[in-house]
Amino acid sequence: MVRLMASKVRLFVDQPLDKGQSVLLNREQAHYLFGVMRLAQGAVLSLINSKDGEWDAEIVEAGKKAGVLICRAQTRPMQVPPDLWLLFAPIRKERTAFIVEKAVEMGAARICPVQTAFTQNAERLRHDKLRAHAIEAAEQCGGTFVPPVDDVAKLDRVLADWPDGRRLLFCDEALLDAPVSLPDLPGPWAVLIGPEGGFSETERAQLRALPFAHPVSLGPRILRADTAAVAALTIWQQALGDWS
Ligand code: SAM
């Protein structure tokens, strides 16, 4: 739940949005809109639900624990990002939150935490918190789409179930001296970022042997995993995504 600079409050709701549609607020949403943002009956805010675009909605009932909004007009159509998944090994809590936030801003279509050989703390990952970070990032960046956030899964399992036709941009820190270059191949992609400890030699050998994996360098310096995620999404969006 956020307010964009000099504009309306934006709120994600898990309910349909359409002309005249009423939207019921839960306790947390009512507290935020009426208690924190001090909005009152008659005020208009923006709603998104990741399905129906962005809508202006008017507050028709404002209570301490609940409220009702009515959708008035669509202000933006639904905009789904290119079919790019971000696979990343979770790192420390606040840095993992950063990766999720940036993945949404950069236009990832799905966020997939993966457990690799050197991943630490994967069992402490809070899926509900990551989902909340994704929602807040979409509200903040003016997007209409909130990418799904998967439960953490073992990397070898994810690779064993890999969908036909999807390519994998394997960001390999061992390629420091190689030029940064992406194959000009359209279609669905995923980016893979390792943990702070990098990939094990066994993982590297397995990944390099996969026909759908394209090992890539992110330049001549070792980037932190969170920086690497942003860098990889940037070069992909620039070369193959909706920035080009
Ligand atoms: N501990 C590893 C080392 O010293 O070689 C570095 C791991 S790095 C902090 C985390 C992840 O970011 C890597 O596994 C890789 O996916 C990505 N990464 C960082 N710098 C990179 C680079 N220059 N090229 C490709 N990938 C990079």
Image (cartoon, rainbow, N blue to C red):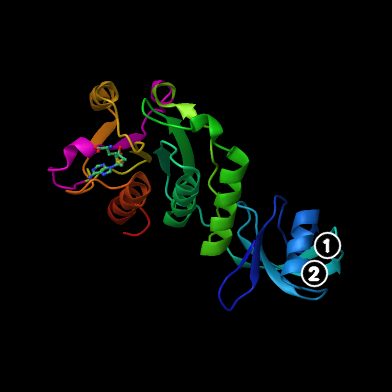
Residue 121 in picture, x, y percent from top left: 48, 32
Secondary structure under tag 1 reads strand
Left-right relation of 219 to 198: left
**How far apart are the alpha carbons under marks 2 and 1?**
6 Å
Label 2–label 1 contact, CB within 8 A = yes
Highlighted range, magenta: 158-181
Farthest bottom residue? Answer: 6
Secondary structure under tag 2 reads strand
Residue 37 in picture, x, y percent from top left: 71, 71
Q: Residue at x 23, y 35 (%)?
A: 215
Q: Residue at x 32, y 34 (%)?
A: 197
Categorize mark 1 by other alpha carbons within 10 Å: few (<14), some (14-19), many (20+).
some
Check disc 2 and report the residue beneath it: 59
Q: Please tell me which residue lies in front, 3 or 16.
A: 3
- Quadrant, the C terminus: bottom left
Residue 77 on the magenta span? no
Q: Please tell me which residue lies in front, 136 or 240.
A: 136
Left-right relation of 135 to 102: right
Residue 170 on the magenta span? yes
Total labels drawn: 2
Q: Look at the picture and state if 33 lies above or below 129.
A: below
Categorize mark 2 by other alpha carbons within 10 Å: few (<14), some (14-19), many (20+).
many
Give amino acid for label 2.
Ile
Residue 24 in picture, x, y percent from top left: 81, 56
Is residue 142 in view? Answer: no
Check disc 1 and report the residue beneath it: 68
Residue 120 in picture, x, y percent from top left: 43, 32
| Label 1, ligand 1: CB separation under 8 Å | no
Q: Residue at x 70, y 54 (%)?
A: 13
Left-right relation of 102 to 234: right
Q: Look at the picture and state if 157 lies above or below 106.
A: above
